[in-house]
Image (spheres, rainbow, N blue to C red):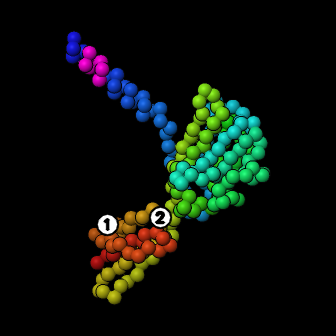
Amino acid sequence: MELLLFLSFCFLTLSGLTFAAESETPVARVTVREDDDVILPCSLDTNENIESMLFDWVKEVPRKEVFMYRNRNHYDNGLPGQDVEFKGRVSHFPEELKYGNASIRLKQTRVEDNGTYTCIFPEIKPSEKIFRIELVVGAAPEPYVTILKEKGLLQCKVPGASPKPTVEWWDSDNKTLPSKTVQDEEEQGRPSPPSRLL
C-alpha cells in the first residue's frame, strides 16, 4: 500500500512538472538573412476581430518598443513611444486585423535585431494572451579563398558572417578534406574565423 501511495505521489509530481512546462509560453523561431524583410507571426486562434483592441510588440532584452496598436492608432500614425531603431521599419497588416492577425513586418533586418520578441494582448480576459518569437538574423557575405605564401595552403574567410559559419573543404570527388579553423580578428564587430587547408 505504501508503494502504491509513493508511486501515485511520483506520478502526480511528474504530471505537475509536465503541465507546468506545457503552460509556459512557447517560443517560435524565425530565421532571416540580413537586409531581408521578415514577418513576425502573431494571431489569435479564435480569429476574433482585433481592430478595436490593444496589442503590443516588444523586443525583450534589452526591452524596446517595436510596434503598438491601440483602437486603430499605432506608431505609424501618431502614437508615440516606438524605439528609434524600429522607426520606419515596422508595419502591420490592417486588412488582417478583423481575422485576429496581429503579425508585423520588420523591414531591412539587421544582425542587431536578433533576439526574442513578444506580442501581447493585455486586455484579453480572463488572462492576457502572449506570443513569443525568437528572431535569428544571419549575415551571409560571400566567402573568399586565398592562396597563402606557404606551399599548398589555402585560406577561406567569410568576413562579417553571423552566426559563425562552418567551412568545409571538398576535393573533386566530393570527399571532405581535413582542415583547421583558426580564430582571427573581428570584422564589423563579428568574428571572422578563417579555415585553412594544407
Q: Residue at x 60, y 33 (%)?
A: 128
Disc 2 residue type?
A: Ser
Quick one: quadrant of the N terminus?
Answer: top left
Quick one: quadrant of the C terminus?
Answer: bottom left
- Is residue 48 found left or right of 110 in the rendered image? right
- Is residue 148 found left or right of 28 in the rendered image? left
Question: Looking at this rendering, what residue extends furthest in the top direction?
Answer: 1
| Corner quadrant of residue 144 | bottom left
Q: Residue at x 34, y 25 (%)?
A: 13
Element marked by disc 1: strand
Rendered image: mark on residue 162: 2
For the record, the magenta segment spans 5-10
Residue 165 appears in view: yes
- Is residue 98 found left or right of 40 in the rendered image? right
Lower position in the chain sequence, tag 1 or tag 2: 2
Residue carrying label 1? 176
Element marked by disc 2: loop
Could you say where residue 56 lies in the image, as x and y percent from the top left?
Answer: 65, 44
- Residue 115 lies, with reference to residue 158, above or below; the image says above
Disc 1 residue type?
A: Thr
Could you say where residue 181 lies in the image, as x and y percent from the top left?
Answer: 33, 71
Could you say where residue 147 lies in the image, as x and y percent from the top left?
Answer: 37, 83
User: Is 177 in front, or is 146?
Assistant: 146
Find the distance from the CA under tag 1 to the CA under tag 2.
Answer: 23 Å
**Helix, strand or loop: magenta stretch:** helix
Could you say where residue 76 lies in the image, as x and y percent from the top left?
Answer: 75, 53
State yes or no: residue 6 in magenta: yes
